Image (cartoon, coloured by chain):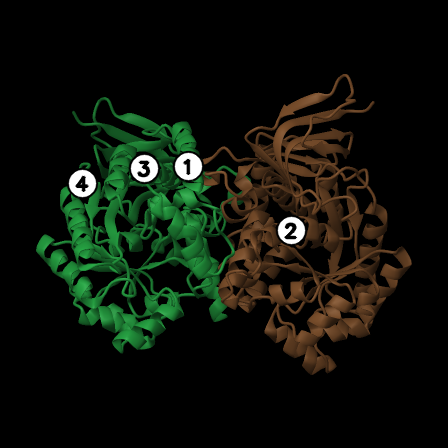
Chain colours: A green, B brown
Amino acid sequence: MMTQLWIENGLFVTMDETNPKINGHMVITDDRITYIGAEAPVDLLPDVQKLDGSKLAFMPGLINTHGHAAMTLLRGFSDDQNLQVWLQEKMWPMEAKYVDADTKAGSALAIVEMLRSGTTTFVDMYDRMDQVATMTEQAGIRGILTRGVIGLCSEEEQKTKLNDAITFARDWNGKADGRISTMLSPHAPYTCPPEYIEKFVQAAHDLNLPLHTHMSETLAEVEMNVRDYGVRPVEHLDRLGFFSRPALVAHAVHLTDEEIALLAARNVSVSHNPVSNLKLASGIARLSDMLNAGVKVSLGTDSVASNNNLDLFEEIRFSALLHKGISGDPTAIPALEALKLGTIYGAEAIWQSDRIGALKVGMKADFIAIDIDQAHFYPMTDIVSHLVYSGSGRDVKHVWVDGRQVVRNSICTMLDEEKIRYEAQASFERLLKG
Amino acid sequence: MMTQLWIENGLFVTMDETNPKINGHMVITDDRITYIGAEAPVDLLPDVQKLDGSKLAFMPGLINTHGHAAMTLLRGFSDDQNLQVWLQEKMWPMEAKYVDADTKAGSALAIVEMLRSGTTTFVDMYDRMDQVATMTEQAGIRGILTRGVIGLCSEEEQKTKLNDAITFARDWNGKADGRISTMLSPHAPYTCPPEYIEKFVQAAHDLNLPLHTHMSETLAEVEMNVRDYGVRPVEHLDRLGFFSRPALVAHAVHLTDEEIALLAARNVSVSHNPVSNLKLASGIARLSDMLNAGVKVSLGTDSVASNNNLDLFEEIRFSALLHKGISGDPTAIPALEALKLGTIYGAEAIWQSDRIGALKVGMKADFIAIDIDQAHFYPMTDIVSHLVYSGSGRDVKHVWVDGRQVVRNSICTMLDEEKIRYEAQASFERLLKG
């Protein structure tokens, strides 16, 4: 049986160039947008549901293109530390203690936070990915999931991990009514030997899947790449065939002009993680230069262990503000460009712009409603400016993914939030002791 | 008749070095904190009110040390522009049309936003300050108010403006049960001739008031100062006697080591406005260097026309993140230092640390309650980290100023928020036409 929702008298920020802002109506039929326009819709189903859209702004759901949801258990566990202390003394020992229940608890907590703050699609790279996929299925969110593999181990272990990654990617791709898709992920050029990365490239060809990795996050890792392999990471990955597949690289902080040109030429997607890069003092990515060169840039939070939250509005705001201050050019990354980074560009970065990232007829109904009847959205001048410079995930009131309402009045409809908070706390305390 | 409030079983982030974090109780008697500690209080009034503090974190109210509340009407009116276009083509023509009702409407909107996001004390520099003071009195917020004077005009106009500033400062200082105090403010060294600034210094001595001004916000204005007066702004103001009074300077972006040393030696207060400085691409202040040199730094939003919001949690977060990224040192501006910037350092910057900025016995009861039973505050690890890296003004549930509850369940108790939003919109539309 078909279901239909008519949103009346809303303000729609569409991210569709031909019709960027609509005061009017939108109709969702099952999982798709079937009408959007200034005029009231006609020919609706007899039992169409109605929602009063006044005092709300609607926009595409946000797309978070890099993260590690299970690490949400480590929020606030180690801040303001040097990278090596943070990683080797704090993160790794805790992560080594994870069991399935912890990955599940951390992912669930992350998904609650993401959905409530308006993220409808997230990229996740971690291990025990069955747990993350199960939570994704249950929560109603859209996920691009991938088992991240560190290859600094024996050949046998490498083989086991690669097979694990392949099995996960094959089993879950297209699952949850198509909400889940998968990738293959050698963790990073500095944590995977070249021949091991090549095996991932081959598997990605065999399975017709994209690739995801961390790249050029810190200056130290770039220098190590040059020392070990004679080239910088972009050329290194290119030589290994990484960019012969659709590829998404996270961070891309330290790039030369030549590397930016090569990323553009190879149509590589970049996940810019401004907050994580600031917090770990990794540096500030050349966002304007990448965009000007035609690189497909999007936004990611990275894990909360280096953020420490999953509100993508914050990444949007940092993108708009930071690159003005750094460049000395107040016209850099205008508000609309920043909002695109979190929506339509995110969809392009994960090769789903035919389905998500904009509000127009035929697209999947992944969208959010923002309560704009609050002081910080007044006066009503430029809604795009308000969303970028004054908005927050806390202003999100309703969220739909695939036509299903997954957040209603700021509460996740498919999840028991109280239980999830409780279990996350219990997991963290067990990890701390264990 | 005395009133008494007992907050039971709360988590208190005190900003008091001797007792930074308390799981326990706080008692407010009239306008003061009369007890705070782990044990339940004794000897309370028979009719003491009780508040269940569980699932809440309490901390001192935030202190915003630079802004122009009335400009809240211009939120989103001009973004992503070069400074001169923004100022000369957009801001000034609109501001020239302001009448009293607009200043009142803009200030009211700003105060709603500030109170709801946990700011209990704000510094405001603008004109028509009677309107701002009246709203401050009515809203229950604490204000340090000052008529900002641009001196690029005839001697007669200069005299009128100075008298206006003096009259306002004299009439309102200490009003609203002491919640309002005043300062004198030549707008900036580049908008006031030296001899005019000297008249403000003299008046500040006569009235025993502090001084406030904009200083070294842009490189261009520093260069102009050197060209016109042969010295950079800090030395220029020092020569004019500005620092012989308690003085608060906003921005202080472009400073030499010598200027930082002089600001420290003269005990000058600085209002660091990281978001505004990024948005207008003015530059990035040397926050760590100022703090290391012993300069009294605090945080300000500046007006929403260059921010575009008044959530001081955001300035706190930007302070913590930005200066790590810029310096390459992830240990720069740790979370606690960032939180101090928005609380106790703010109180010191406005010479009120004997009264506000910390939760301890004898202090004024200016404090806020934050709803920490939300996904983004889990797991409960380090509350200071969570407030700085994951918190937001939207998480503020209750606010007290001078012992009176001015926000209850996220709604201002003393103000008609709906009317204020409506009037702000009406004022903006009138300005746009007029």
Residue A335 in picture, x, y percent from top left: 43, 56
Q: Residue at x 82, y 46 (%)?
A: B172
Residue A104: which disc?
Answer: 3
**Discs 3 and 1 share one subunit:** yes
Chain letter belonging to callout 2: B
Q: Secondary structure at mark 1?
A: helix
Chain letter belonging to callout 3: A
Q: Is residue B104 left or right of residue A281?
A: right
Q: Secondary structure at mark 4?
A: loop
**Marks 3 and 4, how far apart in space?**
21 Å
Residue B340: which disc?
Answer: 2
**Marks 2 and 4, how far apart in space?**
48 Å
Q: Secondary structure at mark 3?
A: helix
**Marks 3 and 2, how far apart in space?**
36 Å
**Residue B88, image quadrant:** bottom right
**Discs 3 and 4 share one subunit:** yes
The residue pinned by badge 4 equals A178
Residue A430: which disc?
Answer: 1
**Discs 3 and 2 share one subunit:** no
**Of the pair A82 and A367, the residue shown nearer to us:** A82
Q: Is residue B251 visible?
A: no
> Looking at the image, is mark 3 or mark 4 earlier in the sequence?
3
